[in-house]
Image: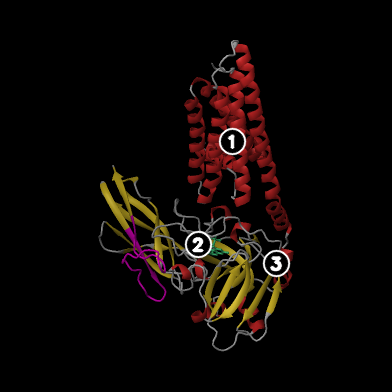
Amino acid sequence: MTSSRRSWATAGLVTGLAGLATSYLTASILNVRDAPVVAVGELVIRITPGNLAERAIGLVGQWDKPLLITGVVLGSIVVFVAAGLLGRRHVWLGTLAFTVLGAVAVAAVLTNPVDTQSGLIPVVVGYGTWLLAFGWLSAMLRRPAPAGVPSELTADSISRRGFLLRAGVVTLVATGAAVGGRVWGAGARKVEQVRKLIRLDGVSMPKIPKGAKIGLPGVTAWQTPDEEFYRIDTALAVPTIDPQEWTLRIHGLVEREIEVTYQDLLDRQKTEMWVTINCVSNPVGGNLIGNAWWSGVRVADLLELAGPIEGADAVLQTSEDGWTCSTPLAALQDARNALLAVAMNGAPLPIDHGFPVRTIVPGLYGYVSACKWVVDMRVTRFDKVAAYWTERGWSEQGPVKLSSRIDVPASGDTVTAGELRVGGVAWAQYTGIEGVEVSLDGGPWVPAEIAHVPTNDTWVQWAATLQVAEGDHEIAVRATDKLGEVQTGEVQDVVPDGATGWHLVDFTAEA
Ligand SMILES: Nc1nc2c(c(=O)[nH]1)N[C@H]1C(S)=C(S)[C@@H](COP(=O)(O)O)O[C@H]1N2
Ligand SMILES: [Mo]
């Protein structure tokens, strides 16, 4: 026997909403930037032709996002009902519909330039919920008529009662999950509210320095917008810290232990600068690198208050969530102006990037220096401590390596034969980039033009013009720093202290 269309539609709908609810709860707990629904909405934006999207946004103004989310939810509801009705034909058809929807969500998360992979966890939880709930509900709808009950009507009413009971249970669990998600997210929302209201004196947002842009389309933006800034941390649930409650303790091998409050930092003179930071696990050609305008208080000034004593050579930094890194004391005291940053790109640090306070040290990889949500600095000696990544086989010292990347063309591109503009970025923070060279098909190195940057602490955009004949080609790039070192072509993996080798890009030139 088969139950009514309405029951199957209900099964699909209840199942679908339950999965949305549990994925939302998971996203709240993990503080994933956005629940899967938002990721799918952003996928819709990405695959909508640019001018169409712009016109649509122009039409609805600031309501674009809420409307989009509503649209995705309504669209999903249609699919949920359809999945239920398909399930009436064959249960596997309904399951397939949920699987397709799950695959869309996975694609949305994976193709989102700013989502990290932890964004997949809510999708998996939601999909698991769909399978469980749909299996459980459909089992009741497909029950054969109980033996000895002659009338089909009676059989139907018995299974309908069981079905309604199960549908009620699933609805209840889903409601609980949705409410739980709201409650769990409240803490983060509160800190986000506080963050938005903070006024930072002495924090500015200058224009991009004159000459820093090479002007070649396709080369990565010189200033990285917050939303596109790579994010690396071990925190599944990002610390949400009320700045009123934040303190930094500086202790260990010092003359006097000190404690600094957020207000202390706000009251102090700000130092502001462009700094490019990058991750030691950035492979050659990778994009775990970003450039921002950072504002904060010099770590050196605070260390001076505490007074490090003879023999100290390291500072063990600890974050609110217990992550640690050991930083050379000298790099926190010298002229590079290591910062306790309170602002990124002219606004209080985004929560994901360390709100309320993080460390920024020009010239060192993030894993040995850029402690987000920093709460403790212990002045110590390298031979006395180990930190999170150094315990796991990464090198104790982590100066950034001279490196360069090709942004245009991209690997696999097809270009027009003849004159070809190529370009990208190069970096050697705290040392500075002197020049960049490119080589076509293993030929001689030819100098590229480089843009002008105001300090040595940022990446530098470069571009060059090549003559390319029809056919397949490969280009390579290498940089030279201001100490005269030429970027090595020797290939080394990211472990233990950063990748080396030249970035190579293959492309095809057509008439
Ligand atoms: N608290 C904390 N700070 C951290 C990390 C971390 O896991 N936890 N990762 C570090 C690493 S490896 C890098 S590369 C940078 C990345 O900073 P971002 O996420 O703001 O780009 O943060 C550093 N600071
Ligand atoms: Mo990193």
473 or 135: nearer the eye?
135
Circle 2 SS class: loop
Residue 170 can be seen, yes or no:
yes
Q: Which amino acid is tagged 3?
A: Trp
Circle 3 SS class: loop
Cα separation, mark 2 vs mark 3, equals 36 Å
Is 400 placed above or below 466 here? below
Looking at the rendered structure, the number of numbered marks drawn on it comes to 3
**Quarter in which the N terminus is drawn:** top right
Query: Most prominent secondary structure in the magenta stretch?
Result: loop
Residue 421 is situated, as x and y percent measured from the top left of the image, at: 37, 53
Residue 480 is situated, as x and y percent measured from the top left of the image, at: 38, 70
Count residues near mark 2 (Cα–Cα under 10 Å), then give few for <14, some for 14-19, many for 20+. some
Residue 76 is situated, as x and y percent measured from the top left of the image, at: 58, 31
User: What residue sits right under mark 2 in the picture?
Assistant: 212
Q: Nearer the viewer, mark 2 or mark 1?
A: 1
Q: Nearer the viewer, mark 2 or mark 3?
A: 3
Image quadrant where residue 45 sits? top right
User: What residue sits right under mark 1 in the picture?
Assistant: 55
Point 60% across, 10% down: residue = 151
Is 368 placed above or below 351 here? below
User: What residue sits right under mark 3 in the picture?
Assistant: 246
Task: Please provide the residue range marked out in magenta.
Answer: 476-504
452 or 408: nearer the eye?
408
> Residue reaching furthest top?
151
Cα separation, mark 2 vs mark 1, equals 32 Å
